[in-house]
Image (spheres, rainbow, N blue to C red):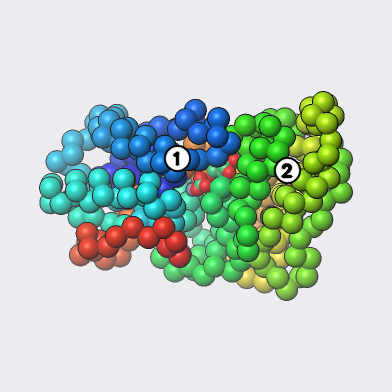
Amino acid sequence: MYILGIETSCDDTCAAVLQNDRILSNVISSQINLHSIYGGVVPDIAKRAHQQRLPAIVSLALKRSGIKLTDIDLIAATRGPGLGITLSIGYNFAKELAKTNHIPFVAVNHVEGHLLSVFLKNKNGSPHILPRFPFLGLTVSGGHTKMVLIKKIGDYQVVGETLDDAAGEALDKSAKLLSLGYPGGPVIERVAAVGQTDFLKLPQPLQPKNILNFSFSGLKTSFYYQIKDWPAAKIASHLSDLSATIQASVFEHLIRKFSLAIDLCRPTSLLASGGVLANLTLRRQLRQLAKTKKLPIFFPPQKKLNTDNAAMIALAALYRFQKNKSINDLELDISPRLEL
Ligand code: KG4
Ligand code: ZN
């Protein structure tokens, strides 16, 4: 099957073509340069950029895949969660394309896309993962932080999630405090590389061992109060240590709760995905945790499959279609707060 996926839930305009679970093309048009001066995503600007770019991005994805629109068997788009005004650009475009060309349409949950992104394959069919269910998945991005027990594809149980900010959001906001620009996660990773991880004392949130949820707002607030009266020169001279400290605290919290969830859920395998998993330190810590627990852990096979992309949306749609060949979601509308 050939699947065309479209994703516009935030600030990346994405289109991809899969042949089953193999990626034939995966085009991502980032809007970082439009939003960085504002220190975060400006929904109106994102909406306009999606409108302007999406038709060309879809054409490019088709061209790079070598597949004609008339040969596409399934069209998929992100239904939610995400920003309503940006979701609707990709979603309605995809629906229109499906309707006009009489192609079945599947609406996809963005978080499910991130979780399943570890099963994507390169053009040559690698890597070949034999899914050993149940998986415990950790998905961490700028919009969500969730631990999900995946009993099989399509059968999900959220076992823990953030009660306030997402982990990526905490990194983005901390980077803003340090005037490091947007998005903060990648800059913090770079600057933190030579820093001291215990430069400030930050609280570890939600200590009790029966709580599987996350909370990042206390960490971020404590970070803010400790440096708010510092002169800019002092912050500038300790950028590496400050970045390393906030990054280490955010990751310690993720690892502690994921470790706890593994003990309670007893999965057979682990997976981790989402924008923050582009971070090599976090991946190393998760690999170490998996080793300690004697479990295999899987990540998306390419770095650019961690952050938002349409290949993961197309794959989630394929799995849903395989389970129900008569699925056609044309009647559904976007859902900015869609639950898993
Ligand atoms: O999955 P994603 O592209 O979009 C959402 O669904 O939110 O994730 C974006 C988030 C941002 O918060 C960004 O700062 C973070 O992922 N991120 C990183 C890295 N690359 C992106 N965080 C830490 N280290 C990175 N290398
Ligand atoms: Zn995402």
The number of callouts visible is 2
Residue drawn at point x = 61 percent, y = 66 percent: 160
Residue drawn at point x = 63 percent, y = 42 percent: 172
Instruction: Say which residue label 1 marks.
Output: 11
Amino acid beneath label 2: Gln
User: In terms of sequence position, does the residue under pointer 2 or pointer 1 come before the other?
Assistant: 1
Location of residue 147 in the rendering, given as x and y in whole percent from the top left corner: 59, 62
In the image, the residue with mark 2 has its CB under 8 Å from the nearest atom of ligand 1: yes
Location of residue 189 in the rendering, given as x and y in whole percent from the top left corner: 68, 35
Identify which residue, 86 or 261, lies in the foreground: 86
Q: From the viewer's perspective, is residue 279 above or below residue 313?
A: above
Location of residue 240 in the rendering, given as x and y in whole percent from the top left corner: 78, 31
Instruction: Name the image quarter holding residue 311.
Output: top left
Q: Spatial distance from mark 2 to mark 1, Cα to Cα?
A: 23 Å
Select label 2 or label 1 by which is in front: 1
Q: Can see residue 319?
A: no
Q: Residues within 10 Å of mark 2 (few under 14, many from 20)?
A: many
Amino acid beneath label 1: Asp
Left or right of residue 64, residue 275 in this image: right
Left or right of residue 211, residue 98 in this image: left
Residue drawn at point x = 18 percent, y = 39 percent: 69
Instruction: Say which residue label 2 marks.
Output: 247
